[in-house]
Structures are given as structure tokens and as C-alpha cells.
Image (tube, rainbow, N blue to C red):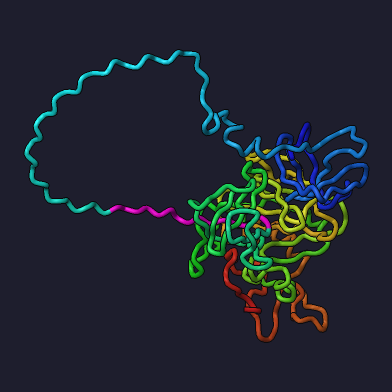
Amino acid sequence: MRAAHSDVIIRDRPALNGVDGGTIYEGSLVIVFPSTRTEADGYVWVRHLRGWSPERRIDGTQTFLIRVGLAAFFDREARTGTPKRGQLESTDTKPEPEPEPQPEPEPEPEPEPEPEPEPEPEPEVEVTETPAQSFRAMMRVRVRIGPGLNYPDVQPDSTVGLEHVITADPSSRVEADGFVWIRHGRGWSAERSINGDIVFLQPINQPPPPVDAGLPTRTDLPGYKALIQRLPVNIEQTAMFQYFGNNVFAYTDGRNFNYDGYSQGLHGGLDFLNQAPGIPVYAGVEATFIDVRRVSPNLSVWLKAGDYTLIYQHITNPRRFNPGQRITPDTIIAEIEPLPWYHLHFEIRYREFTIVNPLLLMPDRLLNAIVNKFNPATPARQGSVSQLRYFYHSDQWKQWTKPLDQPMIQLGGPLIGPRA
């Protein structure tokens, strides 16, 4: 279906008060599931791969999504006007008369055969292999035995997990059933829709570093103690806080939230918690806008600042910007989603694969504002699994218990820390 006459909202459920999931821009295509049509709040809603959107008003006074035949977009003849195979072009010219037969010439005597030369050795053919390319899953992506919707999964519930990185063969791309499919080590997965409206696997410009590759040190980082010019959430509006790295939540619950597969078992960002609605989220840096994404069941804003990618997750009411638009530190980009997450997860990646402690990129005035309000030396409550409230500390584990004493995290790297 196509967004007919205007931008169309996306919600996480068929209701106007559902969580905002972004926008289908006017003229864009989506692939919908017709059997999901549901009437609510005066609209007929339909589910697609990005969530739910209103197709039309129940009373028929307004239509938002119109049905479009796939052949109009995927049929070469429909797009280019190329005549169908076997179709003849019309002509009004009369056929030319056949030429008069000519007498055959006398055959010339055959020359003496020359001796055949010795065959030269065939040159070796140089085979150029297409280099493999890395892709990051923007959502959970199914893995099938072949390139198409009719092929079954390799195994039941076989998927590439959210944010997992795979290596695929770019030369294997095949278009089928409205999607571009690509082959990787586990099977076939949809890379994107043919029209580019939906991206499942995002190409990464550089391959992931080997597991034993050296990670940057803090002083190697561009913008060390300077990149972040204001906190993404005002400290006065931060009711609770979670530090980067070896925090207590990563020890107690990290396995349940895929910390082990994503961020080596540690917490890959800073969390600013507040349950009140309408808490603004600031960019905090000089950057450019990438996009708004639905990651898992929630939204995130992605910005770019040099070699850094900044991710602001668990947000609502994202402000609308154009890709590449300049963002200033004081720009409000969204608000904290009050329920069910009620916190901003602020994550920074350096050159795609290294998750960096944002505190390393803050000047002392911002670092001190956090540390003074959320003292990392605060002891845990009696009976806790940890001796400290914010960082995991026990008789057996005494590493990484201070805000700046945290390791660089390799995206998708092996498990490290107290549970390793």
C-alpha cells in the first residue's frame, strides 16, 4: 500500500494513543497484512512490518493508505514500456521484392594445408572474489533456506537477533516477493524491501575487528573530555541513574536483556531515569541527524558526530529532522518515554564497533554533576548481591568499580566481567 495524500502515523498497536513508531512519508510504500484490519477510534487500522497505521476512516471520508498492485513496481515491462517477448512492432512498409538469382561462381582450388602450429598453453584465469560485507540487524530477522517468503526457516524461530552483526556475500543478492535477499553463513535473510522503505540488515562500512584486536585507549578518543557539551537529560530532572559498564543491573539481569550477546555482558551506556511525562532529551553534542528507528519495542534517535554514532533509546515524541541536518547541543530531539521504560539509554559507538563510556567524553563540570548526585561509592542495601549500589563489587570481584575505570566494550564481542 502507498501513503496516498499525506504522511501517515505509525503506532505500536491499533489505537491513537499507542506509542509513536514514526511516520510513513507521503508516497512511500509499505507491505501490509490485510487479515489484521481492526476498527478502533473511528479508523480502520492495518498492521505492517513497522507497526500499525490507519488505512482509512470508518465512515469513508478519508483514506490514508491505498492499495497498489505489485506488478506496477516490480514488472520491468510496466516500468519501462519494453515490448513483451514475442510482441512485434507494427510497420506500414511493403516487403521488398526478392533479388534475382545469381549464377554460382566456379569453386577455387583448395590451397595446400599448412602445418598446424603447436598449441600455446592457456593463460591462467585470474578469479576475483567478491569481498564479504558486514551487516547489522535493525530488528529480529528471519533466516530461511532460500531467497523468498515461501522458503521455510532454517530451524524453528531461526533469526538474526537485533543489533547482531553478520557477514554476507553481496554478490548473492536476489530480488523476490518484494524484498532483496542476501546469503550469509546461516542461510538467507531479507536485507530490505525492494523500494527501500524497510531496512532489515544495514550495511556496515568496515568489517568488525577480530576478537583479539586492540581497542582504543581513552586518550586515543577524539573529543576526549570535550565532545559532550551538555547532559542529554538535565541533572535536576534525573531521578535515578545507571552507570556504564560493570553496573549491578548488568550482573543481575544483563543475561535476560541480551547484554551477553550485545555488549560483552556489561551495560553499554548511561541511563537517565524519570517517570514523569514530557522530560526533554537534548542532543548534548554538535552532530548531524541520521534517523529515528524502532529498535525492539521502542524508538531511538541516531546522530553522527565524526567517528561517533550516538544513540538515544527509549524515547517518545521524536522531533522531525532531515537526514544530515545539523544538530546543536541544545537541540531537543525527543522526550523520555514515561512507560514502560521511563529512562533514556544514552549510548556512544566509536567507529561502529567500540561502545565507549560517555563519561570519558564529558568535561569535568558535567562528570562532577553526575558523580555528586549519584555517588558511585554509595554502599548497597543490606542483603544485596553487591557491596556497592551502582557498580558490582564482591569479595570475588573487585574490578571496574569506579565511573571512569570501565573497559571499552566491543559490540558483539565475547563475554567479560564478573559473569564471564
Residue 242 screen position, x and y as percent: 74, 66
* Residue 350, quarter of picture: bottom right
User: Is residue 355 rendered magenta in the image?
Assistant: no
Dominant SS in magenta: loop
Eyeballing the image, is 157 above or below 104? below
> In terms of depth relative to the viewer, which is nearer, 52 or 219?
52
Q: Is residue 260 visible?
A: yes
Q: Is residue 20 visible?
A: no
Q: Quadrant of the N terminus?
A: top right
**Count of numbered tags:** 0
**Furthest-left residue in view?**
112
> In terms of depth relative to the viewer, which is nearer, 168 or 58?
58
Residue 116 screen position, x and y as percent: 11, 47
Instruction: Give the magenta-colored segment's residue range.
Output: 125-139
> In terms of depth relative to the viewer, which is nearer, 274 or 84?
84
Q: Quadrant of the C terminus?
A: bottom right
Determine whether, in the image, residue 366 is placed left or right of residue 19: left
* Residue 158, quarter of picture: bottom right
> In terms of depth relative to the viewer, which is nearer, 58 or 388?
58
Residue 56 screen position, x and y as percent: 85, 38
Eyeballing the image, is 43 above or below 312? above
Residue 55 screen position, x and y as percent: 82, 41
Name the residue rendered at 74%, 73% in the picture. 253
**Furthest-bottom residue in view?**
395
Determine whether, in the image, residue 141 is placed left or right of residue 50: left
Determine whether, in the image, residue 331 is placed left or right of residue 184: right
User: Is residue 136 rendered magenta in the image?
Assistant: yes
Name the residue rendered at 76%, 69% in the picture. 375
